[in-house]
Image: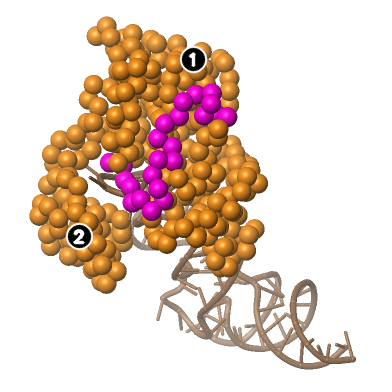
RNA sequence: GGAGGGGUGGCAGAGCGGUCAAAUGCAACGGACUGUAAAUCCGUCGACUUUAGUCUACGAUGGUUCGAAUCCAUCCCCCUCCA
């Protein structure tokens, strides 16, 4: 096997973590987190970070790495995971990347745009401008300096309009120009074997609901109360984990508990759908599992067989 | 029993004679996604056909009118208050 990276991509509650563990046990693997929420420390319960039992079975890395007030992005995660993967190759162990954040996985596999890191001032300035004039006006200003990007974006797309403007402000070069440059792969030497879990929605919905009830029993509410007290800025990524905003509303007295729980479940289901369309339409996989995973030797055997075959092919060619 | 308010598309909720297949929000379905991505955004959403159009729709039935979700009558159901 040469520079293998096994990637397990799938929606929430599809059994990724379990599959990762079962595979890691067979392949001398280490599990690396590819989930944008599990990377933060704030909500191990709500973001379904693997528990201690799982962590004792197999080594897990890149979970609960960043403090809650850290404003992270794909890049920080990419830096971390890149060095972890290289380390594992050195140790002759197999990196198993597991997570539901399609955007992160895509950046790992296909690379990132070579935009330099934007300055904090540019960010602050753009945020201030956004707050002052609103998205649509910012979109208009963007159109003056970067018509191509502006044309592609909805005038309501706060996140992307903000970023495009910020990039222009900081680098003096429109984002559309940056986008023309070739993507940069952090790990050009890696051979990815992607396993995609694609369960049907009804099945997934049930699992999401059951899992959320379990989270509540495990103390999700206390988790959110702590967040409420320790993190001032609720726009921080760590405050966006599913269930956090909903339970926060309850903590703030803006809703009641059953309502908050119902909403959190709804949003979880909607998120799962979004993930499903991401993976369906833009993630190529070497192996597709068309149902949720629970420990099952046949499936593991089958996957291992495919993995070994795949990497034999890679070294030969 | 008396007084009042109301029944609108999967839900909530506007509309109160024509420009209404019916605002808006939610849900649902599909899609996008190049540094906050568990984020953010877009499209569709009565049926059939589809630039246009046809039909069935606003509790039920009947009426007024060129024309009704909108006005009138009767009936059915719901809610609030008084008894």
Left or right: where A107 falls relative to B15 = left
Q: Residue at x 33, y 47 (%)?
A: A72
Inspect the magenta stretch and tell me whether residue A54 lies in it. Answer: yes
| Image location (x, y in percent) of residue A297 | 57, 16
| Image location (x, y in percent) of residue A93 | 38, 17
**Total count of labels:** 2
The answer to which image quadrant residue A235 occupies is bottom left
- Residue A136, visible in the rendered structure: no
Inspect the magenta stretch and tell me whether residue A138 lies in it. Answer: no
> Magenta residues?
A53-75
- Residue A20, visible in the rendered structure: yes
Q: Which mark is residue A121?
A: 2
Q: Residue at x 44, y 54 (%)?
A: A239
Left or right: where A244 falls relative to A122 = right
As displayed, is residue B55 above or below residue B75? above
The answer to which image quadrant residue B72 occupies is bottom right
Q: Which mark is residue A26?
A: 1
As displayed, is residue A53 above or below residue B61? above
Position of the C terminus of chain A, as image quadrant, is top left
Question: For the residue labelled by badge 2, is the local secondary structure a helix, a strand or a loop?
Answer: helix
Between marks 2 and 1 in the image, the one whose residue lies nearer the viewer: 2
Question: For the residue labelled by badge 1, is the local secondary structure a helix, a strand or a loop?
Answer: helix
Label 1: chain letter: A
The one of A76 and B20 positioned closer to us in this rendering: A76
Q: Residue at x 41, y 51 (%)?
A: A68
Chain B's colour?
brown
| Image location (x, y in percent) of residue B76 | 79, 73
Rendered image coloring scheme: by chain
């Amino acid at each position: 096997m040469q520079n293998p990276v096994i990637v397990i991509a799938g929606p929430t509650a599809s059994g990724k973590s379990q599959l990762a563990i079962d595979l890691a046990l067979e392949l001398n693997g280490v599990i690396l987190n590819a989930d944008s929420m599990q990377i933060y420390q704030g909500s191990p319960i709500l973001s379904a970070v693997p528990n201690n039992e799982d962590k004792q079975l197999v080594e897990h890395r890149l979970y609960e790495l960043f403090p809650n007030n850290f404003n992270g992005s794909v890049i920080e995660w990419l830096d971390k995971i890149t060095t972890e993967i290289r380390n594992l190759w050195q140790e002759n162990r197999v990196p198993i990347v597991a997570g539901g954040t399609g955007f992160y996985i895509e950046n790992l596999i296909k690379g990132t745009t070579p935009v330099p890191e934007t300055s904090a001032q540019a960010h602050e300035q753009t945020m201030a401008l956004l707050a002052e004039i609103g998205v649509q006006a910012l979109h208009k200003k963007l159109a003056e300096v970067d018509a191509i990007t502006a044309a592609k974006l909805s005038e309501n797309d706060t996140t992307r309009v903000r970023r495009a403007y910020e990039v222009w402000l900081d680098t003096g070069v429109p984002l559309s120009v940056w986008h023309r440059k070739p993507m940069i792969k952090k790990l050009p030497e890696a051979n990815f074997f992607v396993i995609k879990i694609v369960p049907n929605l009804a099945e997934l919905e049930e699992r999401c609901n059951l899992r959320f009830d379990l989270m509540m029993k495990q103390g999700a509410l206390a988790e959110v109360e702590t967040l409420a007290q320790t993190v001032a800025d609720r726009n921080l990524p760590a405050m966006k984990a599913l269930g956090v905003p909903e339970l926060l509303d309850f903590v703030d007295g803006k809703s009641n508990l059953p309502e908050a729980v119902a909403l959190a479940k709804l949003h979880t289901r909607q998120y799962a759908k979004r993930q499903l369309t991401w993976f369906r339409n833009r993630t190529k996989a070497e192996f597709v599992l068309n149902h949720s995973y629970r420990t099952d030797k046949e499936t593991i055997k089958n996957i291992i067989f495919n993995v070994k075959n795949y990497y034999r092919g890679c070294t030969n060619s």
